[in-house]
Amino acid sequence: MALAEDELRRAHRYGRPICVGMADLDNFKGINDGHGHAVGDRVLQSLAELFGHTLRQSDWVCRYGGEEFVLLLSETTAAQAKIVANQLRRAVEQAEVLPWGSMTISIGVCDVRQVPDLETWFSGADAALYAAKDLGRNRVELAEPLATLAPESERAHWRTYAGRR
Protein backbone atom coordinates (compact mmCIF):
# COMPACT_ATOMS: atom_id res chain seq x y z
CA MET A 1 0.00 0.00 0.00
CA ALA A 2 2.92 2.33 0.67
CA LEU A 3 4.04 1.98 -2.95
CA ALA A 4 0.55 2.83 -4.20
CA GLU A 5 0.39 5.86 -1.90
CA ASP A 6 3.80 7.08 -3.14
CA GLU A 7 2.80 6.58 -6.78
CA LEU A 8 -0.49 8.41 -6.21
CA ARG A 9 1.32 11.42 -4.71
CA ARG A 10 3.89 11.42 -7.52
CA ALA A 11 1.19 11.24 -10.20
CA HIS A 12 -0.74 14.14 -8.66
CA ARG A 13 2.37 16.25 -8.14
CA TYR A 14 3.81 15.83 -11.64
CA GLY A 15 0.59 15.24 -13.56
CA ARG A 16 1.68 11.75 -14.65
CA PRO A 17 -0.80 9.08 -15.73
CA ILE A 18 -1.18 5.98 -13.58
CA CYS A 19 -3.98 3.49 -13.10
CA VAL A 20 -4.84 0.87 -10.54
CA GLY A 21 -6.56 -2.35 -11.48
CA MET A 22 -8.38 -4.87 -9.33
CA ALA A 23 -8.37 -8.37 -10.76
CA ASP A 24 -10.52 -11.18 -9.41
CA LEU A 25 -10.58 -14.82 -10.48
CA ASP A 26 -13.99 -15.77 -11.81
CA ASN A 27 -15.74 -18.57 -9.92
CA PHE A 28 -12.68 -19.30 -7.79
CA LYS A 29 -14.76 -20.36 -4.79
CA GLY A 30 -15.87 -23.42 -6.78
CA ILE A 31 -12.24 -24.46 -7.24
CA ASN A 32 -11.49 -24.29 -3.53
CA ASP A 33 -14.79 -25.91 -2.55
CA GLY A 34 -14.72 -28.62 -5.20
CA HIS A 35 -11.03 -29.46 -5.41
CA GLY A 36 -9.52 -28.27 -2.14
CA HIS A 37 -7.39 -25.38 -1.02
CA ALA A 38 -4.13 -27.05 -2.13
CA VAL A 39 -5.35 -26.93 -5.75
CA GLY A 40 -6.56 -23.36 -5.20
CA ASP A 41 -3.14 -22.35 -3.87
CA ARG A 42 -1.40 -23.89 -6.90
CA VAL A 43 -3.77 -21.99 -9.19
CA LEU A 44 -2.93 -18.71 -7.41
CA GLN A 45 0.80 -19.43 -7.71
CA SER A 46 0.44 -20.21 -11.41
CA LEU A 47 -1.50 -17.00 -11.96
CA ALA A 48 1.08 -14.93 -10.10
CA GLU A 49 3.77 -16.34 -12.41
CA LEU A 50 1.61 -15.65 -15.46
CA PHE A 51 1.03 -12.07 -14.30
CA GLY A 52 4.79 -11.63 -13.93
CA HIS A 53 5.42 -12.85 -17.47
CA THR A 54 2.53 -10.92 -19.03
CA LEU A 55 2.70 -7.50 -17.38
CA ARG A 56 5.31 -4.91 -18.26
CA GLN A 57 8.43 -4.47 -16.14
CA SER A 58 7.16 -1.08 -14.98
CA ASP A 59 3.94 -2.63 -13.60
CA TRP A 60 3.41 -3.95 -10.08
CA VAL A 61 1.08 -6.72 -9.01
CA CYS A 62 0.30 -8.05 -5.55
CA ARG A 63 -2.26 -10.33 -4.02
CA TYR A 64 -4.85 -8.23 -2.26
CA GLY A 65 -6.67 -10.99 -0.43
CA GLY A 66 -8.41 -14.20 -1.34
CA GLU A 67 -8.31 -14.40 -5.10
CA GLU A 68 -8.00 -10.66 -5.74
CA PHE A 69 -4.92 -8.96 -7.10
CA VAL A 70 -4.03 -5.27 -7.35
CA LEU A 71 -2.29 -4.03 -10.50
CA LEU A 72 -0.37 -0.75 -10.40
CA LEU A 73 0.12 0.49 -13.97
CA SER A 74 2.59 3.40 -13.99
CA GLU A 75 2.77 5.89 -16.85
CA THR A 76 -0.50 4.47 -18.15
CA THR A 77 -3.69 6.28 -19.16
CA ALA A 78 -7.09 4.67 -18.68
CA ALA A 79 -7.26 3.71 -22.37
CA GLN A 80 -3.79 2.14 -22.19
CA ALA A 81 -4.64 0.39 -18.92
CA LYS A 82 -7.69 -1.19 -20.53
CA ILE A 83 -5.45 -2.59 -23.27
CA VAL A 84 -2.94 -3.95 -20.73
CA ALA A 85 -5.74 -5.43 -18.60
CA ASN A 86 -7.34 -7.09 -21.63
CA GLN A 87 -3.98 -8.59 -22.61
CA LEU A 88 -3.71 -10.01 -19.11
CA ARG A 89 -7.30 -11.25 -19.21
CA ARG A 90 -6.70 -13.04 -22.52
CA ALA A 91 -3.42 -14.55 -21.28
CA VAL A 92 -5.25 -16.05 -18.28
CA GLU A 93 -8.08 -17.31 -20.47
CA GLN A 94 -5.62 -19.02 -22.84
CA ALA A 95 -3.33 -20.49 -20.17
CA GLU A 96 -4.05 -23.87 -18.66
CA VAL A 97 -3.70 -22.88 -15.02
CA LEU A 98 -6.20 -25.47 -13.84
CA PRO A 99 -5.38 -29.18 -13.99
CA TRP A 100 -8.44 -29.58 -16.26
CA GLY A 101 -8.12 -26.43 -18.39
CA SER A 102 -8.34 -22.68 -18.24
CA MET A 103 -10.12 -20.09 -16.14
CA THR A 104 -11.05 -16.43 -16.48
CA ILE A 105 -10.58 -13.18 -14.58
CA SER A 106 -12.48 -9.93 -14.37
CA ILE A 107 -10.65 -6.63 -13.96
CA GLY A 108 -11.73 -3.15 -12.90
CA VAL A 109 -9.51 -0.15 -13.69
CA CYS A 110 -9.45 3.36 -12.20
CA ASP A 111 -7.39 6.32 -13.45
CA VAL A 112 -5.60 8.35 -10.78
CA ARG A 113 -6.81 11.58 -12.39
CA GLN A 114 -10.34 10.68 -11.29
CA VAL A 115 -9.62 10.55 -7.56
CA PRO A 116 -8.31 12.66 -4.69
CA ASP A 117 -6.99 9.86 -2.44
CA LEU A 118 -5.91 6.22 -2.22
CA GLU A 119 -9.16 4.97 -0.71
CA THR A 120 -11.22 6.47 -3.53
CA TRP A 121 -8.76 5.15 -6.13
CA PHE A 122 -9.10 1.58 -4.85
CA SER A 123 -12.88 1.96 -4.39
CA GLY A 124 -13.23 3.08 -8.01
CA ALA A 125 -11.27 0.08 -9.28
CA ASP A 126 -13.26 -2.25 -7.02
CA ALA A 127 -16.57 -0.84 -8.26
CA ALA A 128 -15.41 -1.26 -11.87
CA LEU A 129 -14.40 -4.85 -11.05
CA TYR A 130 -17.87 -5.66 -9.77
CA ALA A 131 -19.41 -3.97 -12.80
CA ALA A 132 -17.34 -6.41 -14.91
CA LYS A 133 -18.67 -9.29 -12.80
CA ASP A 134 -22.27 -8.05 -13.12
CA LEU A 135 -21.87 -7.70 -16.89
CA GLY A 136 -20.95 -11.36 -17.32
CA ARG A 137 -17.37 -11.86 -16.03
CA ASN A 138 -14.21 -12.36 -18.09
CA ARG A 139 -14.04 -8.69 -19.01
CA VAL A 140 -12.39 -5.37 -18.18
CA GLU A 141 -14.36 -2.32 -17.06
CA LEU A 142 -13.20 1.24 -16.41
CA ALA A 143 -14.36 3.18 -13.36
CA GLU A 144 -17.00 5.80 -13.99
CA PRO A 145 -15.56 9.31 -14.36
CA LEU A 146 -15.44 11.22 -11.10
CA ALA A 147 -14.37 14.82 -10.70
CA THR A 148 -11.24 15.23 -8.59
CA LEU A 149 -13.17 17.17 -5.98
CA ALA A 150 -16.34 15.10 -6.10
CA PRO A 151 -18.60 15.47 -3.10
CA GLU A 152 -18.75 12.61 -0.61
CA SER A 153 -22.19 11.66 -1.92
CA GLU A 154 -20.70 10.76 -5.33
CA ARG A 155 -17.81 8.79 -3.82
CA ALA A 156 -20.33 6.90 -1.70
CA HIS A 157 -21.80 5.53 -4.97
CA TRP A 158 -18.57 3.63 -5.61
CA ARG A 159 -18.40 2.24 -2.09
CA THR A 160 -22.04 1.13 -2.25
CA TYR A 161 -21.56 -0.55 -5.62
CA ALA A 162 -18.24 -2.10 -4.59
CA GLY A 163 -19.92 -3.67 -1.58
CA ARG A 164 -22.19 -5.79 -3.79
CA ARG A 165 -20.87 -9.32 -4.23
Image: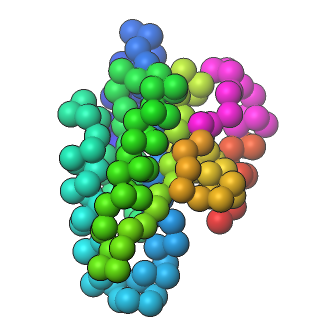
For residue 112, side relative to residue 142 (left or right): left
Residue drawn at point x = 56 percent, y = 50 percent: 139
Q: Most prominent secondary structure in the magenta stretch?
A: loop
Residue 111 visible to an observer of this rendering: yes
Of residues 41 and 83, the one nearer the viewer is 83
Q: Is residue 25 above or below residue 11?
A: below
Residue drawn at point x = 26 percent, y = 54 percent: 50
Colour mapping: rainbow
Q: How many badges with numbers are in the image?
A: 0
Of residues 79 and 73, the one nearer the viewer is 79
Residue 123 visible to an observer of this rendering: no
Residue 70 is situated, as x and y percent measured from the top left of the image, at 40, 48
Residue drawn at point x = 45 percent, y = 26 percent: 80
Of residues 162 and 150, the one nearer the viewer is 162
For residue 80, side relative to residue 45 (left or right): right
Which residues, given as a range, are shown in magenta? 142-155
Residue 94 is situated, as x and y percent measured from the top left of the image, at 36, 58
Residue 67 is situated, as x and y percent measured from the top left of the image, at 41, 65
Residue 17 is situated, as x and y percent measured from the top left of the image, at 43, 19
Where is the N terminus found, in terms of image quarters?
Answer: top left
Residue drawn at point x = 26 percent, y = 34 percent: 56
Q: Is residue 146 above or below residue 93?
A: above
For residue 67, side relative to residue 98 (left or right): right
For residue 136, side relative to residue 6 (left or right): right
Residue furthest to the right in view is: 153
Residue furthest to the top in view is: 14
Residue 38 covered by magenta stretch: no
Where is the C terminus found, in terms of image quarters?
Answer: bottom right
Residue 4, picture quadrant: top left
